[in-house]
Structures are given as structure tokens and as C-alpha cells.
Image (cartoon, coloured by chain):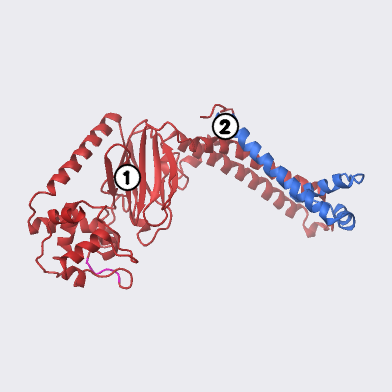
């Protein structure tokens, strides 16, 4: 950790102008010590730029006005002036070094991933995030929940339009969380401005970052590396809770996982499967195949009337579980549980005029997964 | 800028430094192109860049040390 904070007073003296902070176009001071440092740096550098702008343009306009032709000004024709050239090289050099010193101090802190209380692996998927609390038995996907009607302008947009998910990332207050970023398919980037964390999630690589959230609350972010059609549809929601509530959440989530596993052994009726399958379809499949089952011609095939959804059940299950090589169709076998898979396949075989009446049981999926 | 003519090597070093800084007077530039061998300037240039890289590495080490890393 940094022991020399002798730089901070002069940064503070520059940034305590309140006007800029009230502006919504500015970056956020955020909810962590690091995010406030980043904000202060940003403001320091911003005011340095303003000062440079005022001086440079001031001299320029003053010169234009005072040496105008109507006053009889005459140009001095000379080729070089080594002294001036050295001066205008040295001044920016000194300014850059002056900015680099506090920036380096903050960067070194941001890269100090040691002594974390909780490690969370964050994996980017097209187009959702997966959160694995390492060593805690918690592993879930976080998908967009904004209804398609809002996206298609058929309903008024909600308050958190495209910034809402089914399962937010839950963190405790005051603990150092280390994030390990990677991706399953293409490069994504995990960005939560309030935590001052913005890291690329790259297949085959692990990037690290950390945050200590200081206050309970909900912080929202987005993917910031163009990752395909659904890039704008994989938001990040971070819910920061007090330690006791966080532990309760851990317990509840583990319990829910166990309950889900148990429900895979129960009997599900066709109607139950279709009803549950529609929910799964809308959060997991509709981004490509569309809520109408019509797909997007030329990009994503329709499921309504498709030979897969109407044909051999095992072939249909196989493609959902294992994906289809060479296409955007992912392997959902690891992403969804047996009930979700059985339900969504049943739904696809019975929705949009696909009236096969076929029902796929969770037990059948469980068998195939083993 | 002063013009150290006495020593060829010193002059080459001075010119390499001026090139790295990006500012050189026309008079010095003309002199450089009319005297000495190009090889001397090339070798001095390479040496100066190596020194620059080494000093950046030392600077980073120093910064990390000051930060208690």
C-alpha cells in the first residue's frame, strides 16, 4: 500500500470546486476510496487542461488582436528559435510529469490485488455475465430482464431500462473483493463506474481487479467491449449489502441451488414445463431467436416451424445442450439447470404453432448430462 | 545552445540527445552532416536509447519502492 500521500493536498485544493461535481455529464465520484481518487485525478487533470487552454488561447487571441494588420503589424520572418523550441518542449514535459506522479500513486493502489476477503470469477458470455464465488459454492448467471416489449418500443421504458438483471452480483460492505475476469466466447469488458472497475474479460486470460464497496446500495454497469449483437443487452447490477444480510444471501442462494436440484427429480406436467420454459426462453433465448420464435433472417434461425423444434427430440436436446459448432448457438448444458433445459425445450416444441405436444422431463436431461 | 566541438564523441552524444529531445539548431545539424562518420552517430544513438530504457526501468523500480511494493 501507498505510504507517501504527500501529493494529495495539492490535488484536493484543485478539485474542491463544486460546480463540476453537480453536472451529470461528469464521471461519478463513485462508492469506493479508489473511485474517489480516480475522480479527483480526473478533476485535477481537467482543471490543468482548462488552465492550459486559457493561457494558450489567451495568448493567441491577445496576439491576434494586438498585432493586427490595421495597426501596422509586420510579420517577423525567422526560421528557428532553439530557445523557444526547448521551452515549449520542456513545459509540457514538466506538466505531464506533474500529472503522472499522482496518477501513478493511484494506479499502483489499483493494481494491488493482495489480501482479498472474497474472490469472484466474472465470466463474459454472449450476452450475459456469470459470477462464481470461488470456494463458496456459489455460481450463477446474470441475464437481462428488461421485457422485449420495452426494447421493441411496444411498451413505455422502465426506470432501469436495459440496466436490470435477474440475479445481481451481491457483495458485502467493507470487504475487499477481488474480481477475476475472463470470457467464454469473445472479448467483453466489465465496467461498474461506481466501483471504478473497468476490465477486459478475454477468453483464455485472467484479468484482476478489486474493490471495497463502502456503502450498501445498487450499482449498475455495462459491458464496454463491443461483443456482438447483444452487447447493449448484458448489463451489470451490483447489490452491496451489510455483512449479515450478505451471509443470509449466501445461505439462501445455496439453499435455492439445492432446492433446484431437488425439483429436477420431481414430476412436471406439460403445462408447468411450458409456463416455466417461456420465462427461461425470454431471458436466455429470445435475444437471438426472438420472443416470437421468428429469429432474425440471415442471422439467427426461426424456431417456429423449424425442423429442429418439430423433429427428433434427442437432436433438439443435443443442440440446446451442446450448441452448434460454427454458429452463434452456444452450449447451454452448463449454463442452465436440468429443469430450465427441459422446460425451455418443451416450450420451444409447443409455442408459436409448434404443436407437437412433446414434453421433455428434467430427468431425461439429467440422464443425458451424465 | 552551446556547441561542444572539441571532442567528436561528446558532439555525437550531444546530437543524439538533441534528436531524442526533438530540438536541434540548424547550425549543429549542418555540422553533424558534414563531419565525422555516420557509424559514430548510429552507435551513440543506440547507446543513448539503451541508457534511456535503463533509466525508465530504474525510475519504475524507484516508484514501486517508494509505494512500498
In the image, the chain rendered in blue is: B
User: In this rendering, would B10 be left or right of A191?
Assistant: right
Does the magenta portion include A246?
no
Residue appearing at x 33%, y 39% in the figure: A134
Separation (CA) of disc 2 from disc 1 = 40 Å
Residue marked by disc 2: A13
Q: Which residue extends farthest front?
A: A370
Residue receiving disc 1: A131
Q: In this view, does A171 lie above or below A124?
A: above
Which image quadrant is residue A104 in? top right
Chain letter of the red region? A
Measuring from the top left, give residue A199's x and y in whole percent.
44, 47
Task: Pick the residue in front: A3 or B46.
Answer: B46
- Magenta residues (range): A292-296
Name the chain letter of the residue that bears numbered label 1.
A
Question: Helix, strand, or loop for circle 2?
Answer: helix
Q: Are marks 2 and 1 on the same chain?
A: yes
Q: On what subunit does the disc labeled 2 rest?
A: A
Q: Position of residue A156 (x, y in %)?
A: 27, 57
Badge 1 crowding class, 10 Å Cα cut-off, few under 14, some 14 to 19, many 20 or more, is many
Q: Where is residue A76 in the image (x, y as percent from the top left)?
A: 84, 56
Q: Main secondary structure of the magenta part?
A: loop
Which residue is drawn at the image coordinates 20% and 66% (left, top)? A315
- N-term mark: 2 or 1: 2
- Crowd band around label 2 with a 10 angstrom C-alpha radius: few (<14), some (14–19), many (20+): few
Amino acid at each position: 500500500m501507498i505510504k507517501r500521500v504527500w501529493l494529495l493536498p495539492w490535488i484536493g485544493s484543485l478539485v474542491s470546486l463544486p460546480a463540476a461535481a453537480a453536472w451529470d455529464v461528469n464521471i461519478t465520484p463513485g462508492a469506493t476510496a479508489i473511485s474517489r481518487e480516480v475522480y479527483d485525478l480526473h478533476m485535477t487533470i481537467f482543471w490543468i487542461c482548462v488552465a492550459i487552454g486559457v493561457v494558450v488561447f489567451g495568448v493567441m487571441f491577445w496576439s491576434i488582436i494586438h498585432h493586427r494588420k490595421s495597426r501596422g503589424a509586420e510579420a517577423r520572418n525567422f526560421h528557428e528559435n532553439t530557445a523557444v523550441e526547448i521551452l515549449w518542449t520542456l513545459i509540457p514535459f514538466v506538466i505531464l510529469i506533474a500529472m503522472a506522479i499522482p496518477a501513478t500513486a493511484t494506479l499502483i493502489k489499483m493494481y494491488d490485488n493482495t489480501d482479498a476477503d472474497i474472490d469472484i470469477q466474472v465470466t463474459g458470455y454472449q450476452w450475459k455475465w456469470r459470477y462464481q464465488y470461488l470456494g463458496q459454492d456459489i455460481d450463477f448467471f446474470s441475464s437481462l430482464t428488461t421485457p422485449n416489449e420495452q426494447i421493441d418500443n411496444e411498451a413505455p421504458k422502465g426506470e432501469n431500462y436495459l440496466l436490470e438483471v435477474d440475479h445481481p452480483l451481491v457483495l458485502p460492505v467493507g470487504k475487499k473483493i477481488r474480481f477475476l475476469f475472463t470470457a467464454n466466447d469473445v472479448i467483453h469488458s466489465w465496467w461498474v463506474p461506481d466501483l471504478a472497475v473497468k476490465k477486459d474479460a478475454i477468453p483464455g486470460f485472467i484479468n484482476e481487479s478489486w474493490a471495497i464497496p463502502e456503502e450498501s446500495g445498487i450499482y449498475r454497469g455495462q459491458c464496454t467491449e463491443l461483443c456482438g449483437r447483444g452487447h447493449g443487452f448484458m448489463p451489470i447490477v451490483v447489490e452491496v449489502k451489510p455483512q449479515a444480510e450478505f451471509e443470509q444471501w449466501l445461505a439462501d442462494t445455496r439453499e435455492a441451488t439445492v432446492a433446484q436440484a431437488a425439483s429436477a427429480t420431481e414430476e412436471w406436467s406439460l403445462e408447468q414445463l411450458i409456463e416455466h420454459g417461456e420465462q427461461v426462453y425470454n431471458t436466455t433465448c429470445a435475444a437471438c431467436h426472438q420472443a416470437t420464435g421468428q429469429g432474425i433472417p440471415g442471422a439467427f434461425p426461426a424456431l417456429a416451424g423449424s425442423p429442429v423444434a418439430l423433429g427428433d427430440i434427442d437432436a433438439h436436446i443435443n443442440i440446446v445442450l451442446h450448441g452448434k459448432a460454427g454458429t452463434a448457438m452456444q452450449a447451454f448444458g452448463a449454463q442452465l439447470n436440468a429443469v430450465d433445459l427441459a422446460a425451455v425445450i418443451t416450450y420451444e416444441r409447443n409455442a408459436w404453432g409448434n404443436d407437437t405436444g412433446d414434453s421433455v422431463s428434467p430427468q431425461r436431461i439429467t440422464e443425458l448430462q451424465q | 545552445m552551446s556547441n561542444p566541438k572539441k571532442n567528436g564523441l561528446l558532439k555525437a552524444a550531444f546530437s543524439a540527445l538533441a534528436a531524442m529531445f526533438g530540438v536541434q539548431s540548424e547550425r549543429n545539424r549542418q555540422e553533424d552532416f558534414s563531419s565525422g562518420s555516420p557509424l559514430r552517430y548510429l552507435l551513440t544513438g543506440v547507446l543513448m536509447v539503451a541508457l534511456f530504457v535503463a533509466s525508465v526501468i530504474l525510475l519504475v523500480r524507484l516508484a514501486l519502492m517508494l509505494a512500498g511494493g
